[in-house]
Amino acid sequence: MPTSTPMSGASLAEPRSVLVSGASFAGLATAFWLNRLGYRVTVVEVAPSLRRGGTPVDIQGETIAILTSMDLMEAVRERTLPPRSFAFKDAKNTTLGEMAHHPDDEAGPRYEIHRDDLLEVLSGAIGGDVELLFNCSIVAIEERPEGVSATFSDGSRHEFALIFGCDGNRSNTRRLVFGDGEQFTHFMGGYFYLKVVPDTGLLPPNSSEVFAVPGRMAMLNGYDDRTDIGFGFRTAGEIEYDHRNKDQQRRLIEEHFSGLEWKVPDMLAHIGDDNNFYFDRISQIRMPTWSQGRITLVGDAGYCVSPFAGLGGSMAIIGAGRLADALARHPDNYAAAFRAYEEGLRPFVEQVQERAAIDSVQMLFPGDEAEMAERDRKLAFGDIGV
Ligand SMILES: Cc1cc2nc3c(=O)[nH]c(=O)nc-3n(C[C@H](O)[C@H](O)[C@H](O)COP(=O)(O)OP(=O)(O)OC[C@H]3O[C@@H](n4cnc5c(N)ncnc54)[C@H](O)[C@@H]3O)c2cc1C
């Protein structure tokens, strides 16, 4: 378990124990960098193991540079998925518009990797140097001038120099430090379900297909060995549901999608009745600041861009990389480091959030007949901006 940490003012004295909450992309990448910078790192993860599943992660631009400086790009390249075509379908499975995947476009090389493979690469990289505690969560945080103490869910209390909230869209750290997380949630008017199942044969390998009617969208991603089954539905406001109640979430999907055409009946037949799926509201996190005192947020916890942006995993890795850079440039002043991290990254985050809120939602997920008609007009002109 972590030991206590002496600290004074804004400076970070040795030894520097730090706490990371959440062991997904943001948490593992942050832990990696903090370890490399010489901090003693503890990670708490509420789940009993790394949380697997989900759609593949896009790796491009700055994410490649950061993974290269982590010496992980080779491992990522080895697991890169073959290029995938992307087609919009109607109820009769006629293709309305198609987008070929260009791995090397003008924005430079672009790779896709299964979410689980990237988790494996990152967790392998932190190895035994980082203390990783599963089934564990922070229940209280108390900041004092000389440090910050965290009480864990097992009742134990520990002292740290800094705390990094990397615990996702519904961040526990954000709630404990900044108050009710809902005030920072920008609901985008819908919900998204994703389950990875063994190959269903519902579509060719290395292809994606999307079918939409106003307010509802069904998506299939096909790979050599597995199929992603995705459903999304739009709502006027937020619906009442318990984000821990998987039975209820599965029922929501069945209610919204039974009776729909295309491949939807087969998709519903494949989702089974286990709890191994991802379901969440589609939302962004927009906060006036990501840091308070000795605590800062990384990835979805501070600036979720939403599944529509297709950049959540990259943003978490970029966030961790930028934060590490800021801490390296201000080794004795965490306040200056947190400021530099935020000032440098915020414009990019806001740009990505803006684009996801406007273009991607309407294209992938038209809410009504008017948006559907606009999408069809764009498809007819080959203007597929997703
Ligand atoms: C199982 C899973 C499947 C996903 N599938 C998709 C998908 O299909 N499409 C998509 O766009 N995005 C998906 N996401 C979200 C995507 O991973 C993130 O948008 C992105 O990777 C940013 O990563 P992150 O580390 O900031 O957040 P996340 O990947 O959400 O990770 C947050 C981590 O914090 C942990 N955590 C939560 N609460 C606590 C707590 N109280 N204490 C300690 N740890 C806590 C979580 O268990 C999780 O491991 C998925 C996330 C998960 C966890």
Image (cartoon, helix red, strand yellow):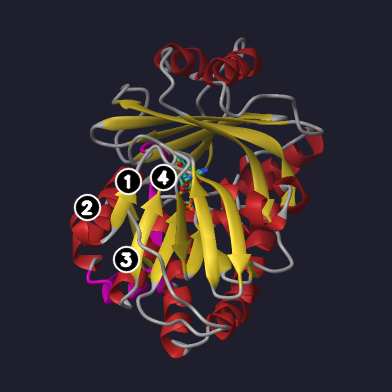
Give the number of the mark in front: 4 or 1. Answer: 4
Q: Are marks 1 and 3 in contact (CB under 8 Å)?
A: no
Q: State the residue position of label 1.
A: 114
Report x, y in % for residue 250: 55, 18
Q: Indicate which disc residue 167 carries.
A: none
Q: State the residue position of label 2.
A: 79
Quarter holding residue 367: top right
Give the number of the mark in front: 2 or 3. Answer: 3
Q: Which comes sooner in the sequence, label 3 or label 4?
A: 3
Disc 3 residue type (three-letter): Phe
Q: State the residue position of label 4.
A: 45
Q: Indicate which disc residue 32 carries.
A: 3
Determine whether the beta carbon of the residue marked 1 sits less than 8 angstroms from the nearest atom of ligand 1: no
Q: Are marks 1 and 2 in contact (CB under 8 Å)?
A: yes
Question: Label 1 to label 3, Cα distance in Å?
Answer: 20 Å
- Of residues 35 and 299, which is closer to you in this image? 35
Question: Label 1 to label 2, Cα distance in Å?
Answer: 8 Å
Determine whether the beta carbon of the residue marked 4 sits less than 8 angstroms from the nearest atom of ligand 1: yes
Q: Is any atom of residue 354 visible in this view?
A: yes
Q: Which residues are magenta?
A: 52-71
Query: For mark 4, does the 10 Å Cα neighbourhood hold few (<14), some (14 to 19), or many (20 or more) residues?
Result: many
Query: For mark 1, does the 10 Å Cα neighbourhood hold few (<14), some (14 to 19), or many (20 or more) residues?
Result: some
